[in-house]
Amino acid sequence: MSNDTIVSAPVITVDGPSGSGKGTISQIVATKLGYHLLDSGALYRLTALSVIKNNIDITDVDAVSKAALALDVVFEPQVDGEQKVLLKGEDVGVQLRLDETSAMASQVAAIPEVREALLVRQKQFRQEPGLVADGRDMGTVVFPDAEHKVFLTASPEIRAERRHKQLIEKGVDANISHLLKSIIDRDERDRTRTVAPLVPAEGAVVIDSSNLTIDEVVQQILDFIGFSGH
Ligand SMILES: Nc1ncnc2c1ncn2[C@@H]1O[C@H](COP(=O)(O)OP(=O)(O)OP(=O)(O)O)[C@@H](O)[C@H]1O
Ligand SMILES: Nc1ccn([C@H]2C[C@H](O)[C@@H](COP(=O)(O)O)O2)c(=O)n1
């Protein structure tokens, strides 16, 4: 891939707190536009999984950063718009969403050297005809020159309710007050960390989806970027 390809393809960034709907909305928007999709949270989760699987000491910054750099990962787009994630050839979709992985992901994401190690890999997703990139720092750090930037949010209570529903539908037992506390704690960590804190990028449109359906959010984004197709 040439550098020209990396620099010129259009990018739409979708940042926001946990459970705001970034992943769901980005996938639909990417499919409608025929764009590539970057789920940057998956890269932090994959690094966390690699740390866990290889018994790496989280305080060993050098070893954790090397794990991030060496990730042997393939994202396989599926016909329904979902992505299969293969780590060293193993389908790790379920492992990526386990509580243990989420907690470790939050820790590895706070290490500046890990963020640096994942930077080039994230930029490589920028390919023609375009990219929808979802995360926390897509518009601020990874693609500051993106044409269109979205900051998607929703109240912690609504996000906890949505997550609760999502887990119950998957047959996972979940307690809504624990989910709410974990969302509030994670928001605080993401917003106050010194490296790449979660803040709306300059020029980003802020969409509060608390009272919007998924279709309404998608439509607001398509209107914002001036897309008039179907
Ligand atoms: N506007 C909406 N109305 C109702 N439900 C929604 C809306 N947006 C997202 N959801 C639902 O909320 C849940 C969480 O959404 P999603 O996983 O996309 O959030 P996220 O921001 O990517 O979270 P994370 O950062 O933790 O990966 C999903 O079940 C999704 O279907
Ligand atoms: N660009 C990003 C993406 C994710 N993170 C952090 C935030 C979470 O702690 C973890 C997993 O993200 P999720 O899959 O829940 O979106 O990674 C980040 O710091 N920067």
Image (spheres, rainbow, N blue to C red):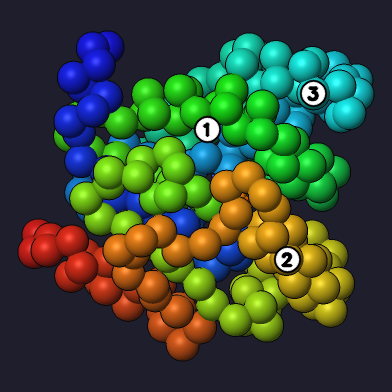
Residue at (51, 21) in percent of width and height: 74
Q: Position of residue 159 (x, y in %)?
A: 63, 74
Pointer 3 or 1: first along the chain: 3
Measure the alpha-carbon separation of dots 1 and 2. 30 Å
Kindly identify which residue carries mark 1.
84
Tag 2: residue type?
Glu
Query: Neighbour class for label 2 at 10 Å: few (<14), some, many (≥20)?
Result: some
- Report the amino acid beneath label 1: Lys
Left or right of 175, for residue 136: left
Question: x%, y% of residue 196?
Answer: 57, 47
Left or right, residue 176 beside residue 45: right
Q: Is mark 1 within 8 Å of ligand 2?
A: no
Q: Quadrant of residue 157?
A: bottom right
Q: Are marks 3 and 1 in contact (CB under 8 Å)?
A: no
Characterize the local packing of mark 3: few (<14), some (14-19) or many (20 or more) Cα atoms within 10 angstroms: some
Q: Determine which residue is flagged by label 2.
A: 188
Q: Is residue 91 above or below residue 12?
A: above
Determine the CA span between mark 3 and mark 1: 29 Å
| Label 3 or label 2, whichever comes before in sequence order | 3
Mark 3 highlights which residue? Answer: 61
Residue beneath the point at 45% across and 78% down? 209
